[in-house]
């Protein structure tokens, strides 16, 4: 049975700090770091290892890894290195480590995201499931007692209705898997009424009905909801929005990748939010990071991915 975490005293950092401590307390999870041949990619892996969150297995060119470590002033002496001569080959080798049970997840190093994801989504990778893969940002904002989950802001550009169904279910499963219980899910748009000229409102209405009929499970959905009506109780009251989700949303489902990217970056750069990200829908979690991510953000994502990897493994052996 999933334990529901209390977030009554949480702040912007305490949520992630607690998650890091929780992940470390359970022990480091082995992750393949795919092509960590630049300092920024190595630094995140080393920091996650230092905190006891991940056990990094570095997959790439040993000479390039050693050179990157030396330039960044990092030591990889305690890390296992598995040789791969190119980024493409590193993806294949890392996937092989998943199938052999040597790692429980994949993490992007210094290769292009497209290179990593192309290898993962390929039919022959053996990592695909019946779900479309999607990305979730977990965001903590000062003044909120629980985290916000924003999806999808990194993988699916203009998702259709079926893809959105998978995006929603992936995020719900993550919310449960991290111990936060059944979430309140807001399907975002610009307005709260159905407008045939705004596709997002039509999709929101369909998704809400799908949840009512059991095609999406484990959560309460409502939409379309504008951002203010989704997260602010006063705005929801002024707009006379009566639903268990309005003003109290825990998962925000954006209409497309552009909207999601703007939401997350606005929260991060204007709202000073902390965030971690994860790709779901494959047989193992995938940790995607950006060159611009801070060490703190990389560690937050590592803790998120480590905990969910443990959850998925518990399901497979149950």
Image (cartoon, rainbow, N blue to C red):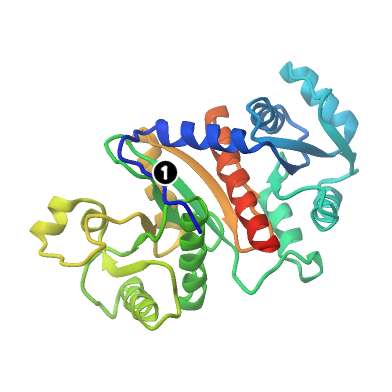
User: What residue is shown at x 31% (from left), y 77% (from top)?
Assistant: 205
Q: Name the residue under label 1.
A: 139
Q: Position of residue 5 (x, y in %)?
A: 41, 46
Is there any visible trace of residue 302 in the rendered image? yes
Q: Where is residue 306 in the image (x, y as percent from the top left)?
A: 62, 44
Q: Nearer the viewer, residue 297 or 52?
A: 52
User: What residue is shown at x 21% (from left), y 73% (from top)?
Assistant: 193
Badge 1 crowding class, 10 Å Cα cut-off, few under 14, some 14 to 19, many 20 or more, is many
The picture quadrant where one finds residue 51 is top right
Is there any visible trace of residue 291 in the rendered image? no
Residue 33 is left or right of residue 25, and the answer is right
Residue 90 is left or right of residue 159, and the answer is right
Q: How many marks?
A: 1
- Outermost residue on the bottom side: it is 213
Q: Which of 6 and 121 is in front in this view?
A: 6
Relative to 243, is 52 above or below? above
Relative to 210, is 151 above or below? above
User: What residue is shown at x 74% (from left), y 19% (from top)?
Assistant: 74
Kind of element beneath mark 1: strand
Q: Where is residue 91 in the image (x, y as percent from the top left)?
A: 80, 52
Viewport quadrant of the C terminus: bottom right
- Outermost residue on the top side: it is 73
Q: Which of 197 and 277 is in front in this view?
A: 277
Q: Position of residue 94 (x, y in %)?
A: 81, 50
């Amino acid at each position: 049975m999933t334990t529901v975490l209390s977030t009554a005293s949480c702040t912007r950092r305490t949520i992630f700090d607690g998650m890091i401590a929780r992940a470390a307390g359970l022990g480091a999870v082995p992750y393949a770091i795919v092509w960590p041949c630049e300092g920024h990619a190595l630094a995140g892996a080393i920091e996650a290892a230092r905190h006891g969150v991940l056990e990094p297995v570095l997959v790439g060119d040993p000479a390039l890894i050693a050179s990157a470590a030396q330039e960044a002033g990092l030591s990889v002496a305690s890390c296992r290195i598995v040789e791969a001569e190119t980024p493409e080959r590193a993806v294949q080798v890392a996937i092989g480590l998943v199938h052999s049970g040597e790692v429980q997840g994949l993490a992007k190093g210094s290769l292009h995201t497209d290179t990593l994801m192309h290898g993962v989504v390929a039919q022959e990778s053996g990592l695909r499931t019946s779900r479309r893969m999607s990305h979730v940002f977990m965001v903590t904002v000062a003044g909120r007692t629980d985290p916000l989950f924003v999806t999808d802001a990194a993988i699916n550009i203009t998702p259709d209705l079926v893809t959105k169904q998978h995006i929603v279910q992936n995020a719900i499963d993550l919310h449960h898997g991290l111990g936060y219980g059944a979430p309140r899910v807001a399907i975002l748009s610009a307005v709260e009424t159905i407008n045939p000229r705004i596709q997002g409102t039509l999709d929101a209405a369909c998704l809400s009905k799908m949840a009512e009929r059991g095609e999406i499970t484990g959560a309460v959905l409502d939409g379309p909801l504008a951002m203010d009506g989704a997260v602010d109780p006063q705005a929801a009251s002024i707009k006379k929005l009566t639903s268990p989700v309005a003003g109290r949303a825990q998962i925000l489902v954006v209409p497309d990748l552009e909207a999601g990217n703007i939401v997350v970056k606005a929260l991060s750069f204007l709202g000073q939010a902390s965030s971690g990200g994860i790709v779901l829908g494959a047989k193992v979690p995938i940790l995607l990071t950006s060159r611009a991510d801070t060490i703190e953000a990389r560690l937050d994502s590592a803790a998120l991915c480590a905990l969910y990897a443990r959850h998925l493994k518990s399901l497979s052996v149950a």
